[in-house]
Image (cartoon, rainbow, N blue to C red):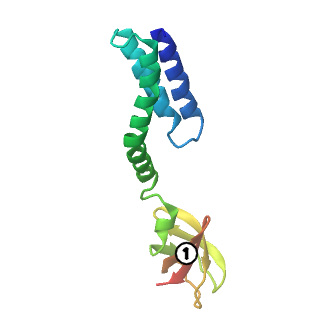
Amino acid sequence: MVWWFWIAVGLVLVALELATPGGFFIIFFGVAALVVGALDLTHAVRQAWLQWVLFPAIAIVALRFFRRPLLERMQRRSQGADDVDSLVGVIAVATAAIPAGGHGQAELRGASWSVRNVGEMPLAAGQRCRVVAVNGLMLDLRSE
């Protein structure tokens, strides 16, 4: 096979991985094709049968050793301090009076949030209260 065929296949597979939410499978075959193309370009591997053996072998080895760490790193990066569910237990300040069971606004981390008072006592404007649950973009509050 000619080296540019492997490079073209590798680039198409890498682009396909980037275009689809696949979970990092196709990219390893794309990288393997790029490696085989580079080996052919440098005349390290000229036999077509050896190229076809190396292509899946490199892809499977890379998939086995690099997929899990890559997924863990991406998942760790996507979770962070901006995770909304991490707001449970944080202190917010009511911006206006909120009756028991009523809805209102509260300030939390410099942003205004829609809140619901799930406590039995009304919340006064400026009162500190604790977030007890997150329901979408609505925070459930109870007096501190």
Would you place residue 128 above or below residue 23 in this image?
A: below
Q: Residue at x 60, y 83 (%)?
A: 118
Question: In the rendered image, is residue 108 in sight?
Answer: no
Report helix, strand or loop for mark 1: strand
The answer to which of 58 and 143 lies nearer the viewer is 58
Mark 1: which amino acid? Ala
The answer to which of 99 and 61 lies nearer the viewer is 61
Residue 80, given in percent of the width and then of the height, sits at 42, 56
Would you place residue 79 above or below residue 87 in this image?
A: above
Q: Residue at x 63, y 74 (%)?
A: 104
Q: Residue at x 49, y 74 (%)?
A: 93
* Residue position marked by numbered label 1 in the rendering: 133
Q: Residue at x 54, y 27 (%)?
A: 13
Question: In the rendered image, is residue 129 in sight?
Answer: yes
The 10 Å Cα crowd at callout 1, few under 14, some 14 to 19, many 20 or more, is some
The answer to which of 39 and 57 lies nearer the viewer is 57
Residue 27, given in percent of the width and then of the height, sits at 49, 32
Residue 85, given in percent of the width and then of the height, sits at 51, 66
